[in-house]
Image (tube, rainbow, N blue to C red):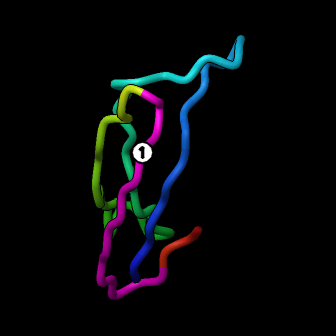
């Protein structure tokens, strides 16, 4: 499975972009005790709050989205 994400982070209480915030991408597994969730990627948002990351995983069991 491959996934890509891009976005812009804003402050919850205002329309202010948030830079230098760590964004993580995880693959969540249905059978977590057998096959734990996988960390696919992380990145920090730029000074405008923008980020882009992608990741890939190959699983024996299906993952939930």
Q: Camera-side residue: 57 or 5?
A: 5
Q: Quadrant of residue 13?
A: top right
Q: Residue at x 36, y 57 (%)?
A: 53
Q: Is residue 35 above or below residue 8?
A: below
**Can you say which quadrant of the picture contains the C terminus?**
bottom right
Q: Residue at x 55, y 32 (%)?
A: 9
Q: In the rendering, at what x and y percent does residue 19 appear?
A: 41, 24
Q: Quadrant of residue 2?
A: bottom left
Helix, strand or loop under label 1: strand
Q: Residue at x 60, y 26 (%)?
A: 10
| Horizontal relation, residue 61 to residue 65: left or right | left
Q: In the rendering, at what x and y percent does residue 32 appear?
A: 40, 62
**Can you say which quadrant of the picture contains the N terminus?**
bottom left
State yes or no: residue 60 in magenta: yes
State yes or no: residue 11 in magenta: no
Q: Residues within 10 Å of mark 1 (few under 14, many from 20)?
A: many
| Horizontal relation, residue 62 to residue 41: left or right | right
Q: Quadrant of residue 55?
A: bottom left
Residue segment shown in magenta = 48-62
Q: In the rendering, at what x and y percent does residue 30 appear?
A: 50, 69
Image mark count:
1
Q: In the rendering, at what x and y percent does residue 46 appear?
A: 36, 33
Q: Camera-side residue: 48 or 62?
A: 48
Q: Is residue 40 above or below residue 49?
A: below
Residue sticking out furthest to the bottom? 60
Q: Which residue is mark 1?
A: 51
Residue sticking out furthest to the front? 48
């Amino acid at each position: 499975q491959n996934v890509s994400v891009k976005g812009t982070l804003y402050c919850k209480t205002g329309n202010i972009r948030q830079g230098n915030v760590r964004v993580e991408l995880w693959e969540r597994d249905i059978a977590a005790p057998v096959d734990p969730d996988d960390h696919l990627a992380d990145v920090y948002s730029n000074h405008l709050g923008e980020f882009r990351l992608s990741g890939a995983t190959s699983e024996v069991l299906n993952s939930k989205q």
